Image (tube, coloured by chain):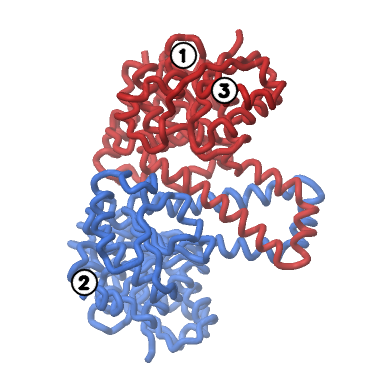
Chain colours: A red, B blue
């Protein structure tokens, strides 16, 4: 089966200048049967494609006149953005012309349009955005990281179900440990929403380990961390910021004497390994969990390496049939 | 002036076995005129003090029969815990027998009892717990990190005022940059509470830089980050967990080949520097901001180095007259 990806070439802070080279990088490292359809300004896309002769044979272009601006409100995107590169890319997946859509554009608009075209599963009130983060045991999935600022207990329990499926089928974890983020691990802590969510998740057929705290995320004792989109987004960005701080501090500190550069040179493989594990670009590409079809969101400010990774993630989601497994669990 | 500290010797997971050696470590490194009064089981405290002849001349002991358990509810501590080591240590500060109280005990009980004995300033609804964290420019203050899970806009604006004073007088920052934690830096983002808090803080006579995000905390562009106690606590612990993960990863990675240990040996000063900056024990000791007198909370699970640091923080707060400066700002 050819895996067909619908790529919004205009989205994000990045646009064609990043999307096309990223697609080329992706194709260079890809051994799957893949076809990419770029949605956007056809003349600009085609011109750019000329620079990448290896990419061209795997590419189609669909011309669109409109672009969703980064500051457009979701409601406005839904009303006025139906002819945009983003909307038409999503629609192509709704019509089964493509298997997955990828955009680095306006998150709110992308989520709103995806919900309309791709629909949520019965039993899912609102889709969630999950994020993979490094942990002592490999990776941990945190959701939601930004789609739903206010969450009901029911919604949090839906996140738990979907996160459990994601960890099993995408991360390959058997019987994933699912935790609910709180500021104390005692059962009586947290507000009413967290208490009720705890009670709901406890009844689910999954390995619920109860409340976990911020320092448990990286510890490796839990595979899925359930939280509301506000807290999850703060956590995601705090981890990114902390990782960057420590790598910068170590670098600067190593520069302070003659010892540093020598130490770095000798230890380079180890430093490179840690830098790679901590590189947020290699975690770029988050699927909207709970939709009937696959829509992957790339960070708006990512670079070629980051967007190429989002394309890789999309292929992975198609191959591992994430929506199918979620539907099976929900029914 | 002799700085007199009231030390709850029984609190936390740690108790006398950590508190007394920590006090000894503190005295060994201290050049201030300080006197410590330990509250708790007098016979056990005195027995332990025998092991530390350098500490004894600076120490008094007040016997108490009761201890506040770690799982006691604040309401119950207020009703039944008035004769505990914690309560009597706080009361000694209320009666001006000591300048500051330090406890590693039950946070909720400590906060509740401190509010009763030490009182909040007019204009402060509830005290906040601030935390100092490493940042690219030195340190950043985040508040609240756990005292107030639900915050009104008014409370958040009080945190902004107090954090501003803390950054000026304790961290020595001129005209501190104060930010409000959100999941987007655009003015229209966030829920109604954050929107209203934004509007309130904007009217204050301080250097408000608007909304900041999780990755801004470590970046060094902001000195004070205002947030509710739930998010702040998650942030604090996420940073601790991330710092630990990366230091462990680097250590393990360096062990993988012969290169690692050599690289480490040569670069040791740099590694040691970063380890020290990231050591959460050196950030231990958080004052309850908004009380008329000084109460410092130590992490319940800290060690000798951590509790000694909390004692140092307490002396610093007394010397720099934090409550006085907060009162000046509020009036």
Q: Residue at x 77, y 59 (%)?
A: A261
Residue A253 is labelled as: none
Residue A92 is labelled as: 1
Q: Nearer the viewer, residue A77 or A97?
A: A77
| Residue topped by disc 2 | B121
Residue A35, quarter of the rendered image: top right
Q: CA distance from mark 2 to mark 1?
A: 61 Å
Q: Residue at x 74, y 58 (%)?
A: B264
Instruction: Return the chain for callout 3.
Output: A
Vertical order, B183 against B148 (above or below): above
| Residue topped by disc 3 | A43
Q: Nearer the viewer, residue A181 or A174?
A: A181
Q: CA distance from mark 1 to mark 3?
A: 20 Å
Tell me the mark number nearer the camera, choosing from 2 and 3: 3
Tell me the mark number nearer the camera, choosing from 2 and 1: 1
Residue B96, x across and y down, in percent:
26, 83
């Amino acid at each position: 089966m050819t895996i067909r990806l619908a790529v919004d070439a205009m989205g994000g802070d990045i646009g064609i200048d990043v999307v096309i080279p990223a697609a080329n990088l992706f194709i260079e490292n890809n051994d799957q049967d893949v076809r990419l359809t770029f949605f956007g300004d056809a003349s600009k896309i085609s011109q750019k494609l000329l620079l990448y002769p290896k990419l061209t044979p795997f590419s189609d272009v669909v011309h669109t006149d409109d672009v969703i601006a980064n500051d457009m409100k979701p409601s406005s995107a839904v009303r006025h953005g139906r002819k945009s590169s983003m909307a038409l890319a999503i629609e192509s997946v709704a019509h089964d012309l493509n298997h997955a859509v990828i955009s680095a554009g306006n998150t709110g608009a992308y989520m709103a349009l995806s919900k309309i075209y791709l629909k949520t599963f019965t039993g899912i009130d609102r889709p969630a955005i999950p994020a993979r983060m490094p942990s002592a045991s490999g990776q941990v999935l945190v959701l939601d990281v930004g789609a739903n600022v206010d969450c009901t207990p029911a919604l949090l329990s839906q996140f738990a179900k979907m996160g459990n499926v994601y960890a099993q089928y995408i991360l390959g974890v058997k019987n994933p440990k699912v935790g609910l983020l709180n500021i104390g691990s005692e059962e009586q802590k947290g507000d009413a929403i967290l208490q009720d969510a705890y009670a709901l998740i406890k009844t689910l057929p999954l390995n619920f380990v109860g409340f976990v705290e911020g320092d448990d995320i990286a510890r490796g004792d839990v595979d899925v961390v359930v939280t509301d989109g506000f807290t999850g987004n703060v956590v995601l960005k705090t981890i990114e910021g902390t990782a960057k701080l420590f790598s910068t501090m170590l670098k600067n500190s190593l520069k302070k004497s003659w010892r540093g550069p020598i130490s770095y040179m000798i230890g380079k493989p180890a430093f490179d390994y840690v830098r790679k594990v901590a590189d947020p670009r290699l975690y770029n590409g988050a699927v909207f969990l709970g939709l009937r079809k696959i829509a992957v969101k790339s960070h708006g400010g990512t670079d070629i390496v980051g967007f190429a990774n989002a394309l890789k993630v999309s292929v992975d989601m198609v191959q591992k049939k994430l929506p199918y497994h979620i539907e099976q669990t929900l029914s």
